[in-house]
Image: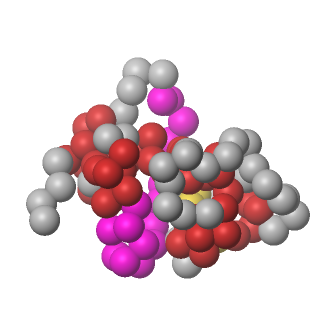
């Protein structure tokens, strides 16, 4: 299945909304990235919007959508092997450090 570029992680910068000015770099295994891309396609979200939704769920900022087949723990497990950084000069950090002290 070929996904529209708006749902793909490797095309995220082409579909950034004007108000999305914070640069966050993301890396992870192809399996996890593919799952996020397929979920973006299923929901009609861009890659950026899907990642933002997932992080919000994992951080307890909002509940999962009513039609989301994954739970909070499912999303946390999916993002577990992935890493992020906010600037090129900062070391990569695991996503798990963001929600180890939080509960939804």
Q: Residue 32: x and y, percent?
A: 42, 72
Q: Is residue 92 visible?
A: no
| Viewer-side residue, 67 vs 96 | 67
**Residue furthest to the right:** 101
Q: Is residue 98 left or right of residue 39?
A: right
Q: Residue 81: x and y, percent?
A: 55, 78
Instruction: Residue at 36% x, 45% y: name it.
Output: 43
Q: Is residue 51 left or right of residue 5?
A: right
Q: Is residue 41 left or right of residue 28?
A: left
Point out the stretch of residues depicted in magenta: 20-36
Q: Is residue 69 visible?
A: yes
| Viewer-side residue, 90 vs 10 | 10
Instruction: Residue at 40% x, 61% y: name it.
Output: 36
Q: Is residue 4 left or right of residue 99?
A: left
Q: How many marks?
A: 0
Q: Residue 70: x and y, percent?
A: 54, 63
**Residue furthest to the left:** 2
Q: Residue 69: x and y, percent?
A: 49, 61
| Viewer-side residue, 24 vs 55 | 55
């Amino acid at each position: 299945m070929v996904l529209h570029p708006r749902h793909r992680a490797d095309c995220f910068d082409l579909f950034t909304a004007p108000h999305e000015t914070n640069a966050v770099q993301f890396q992870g295994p192809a399996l996890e990235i593919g799952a996020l891309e397929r979920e973006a396609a299923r929901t009609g979200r861009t890659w950026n919007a899907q990642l933002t939704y997932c992080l919000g769920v994992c951080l307890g900022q909002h509940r999962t959508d009513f039609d989301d087949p994954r739970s909070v723990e499912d999303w946390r497990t999916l993002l577990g092997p992935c890493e992020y950084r906010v600037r090129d000069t900062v070391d990569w950090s695991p996503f798990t450090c963001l929600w180890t002290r939080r509960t939804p």
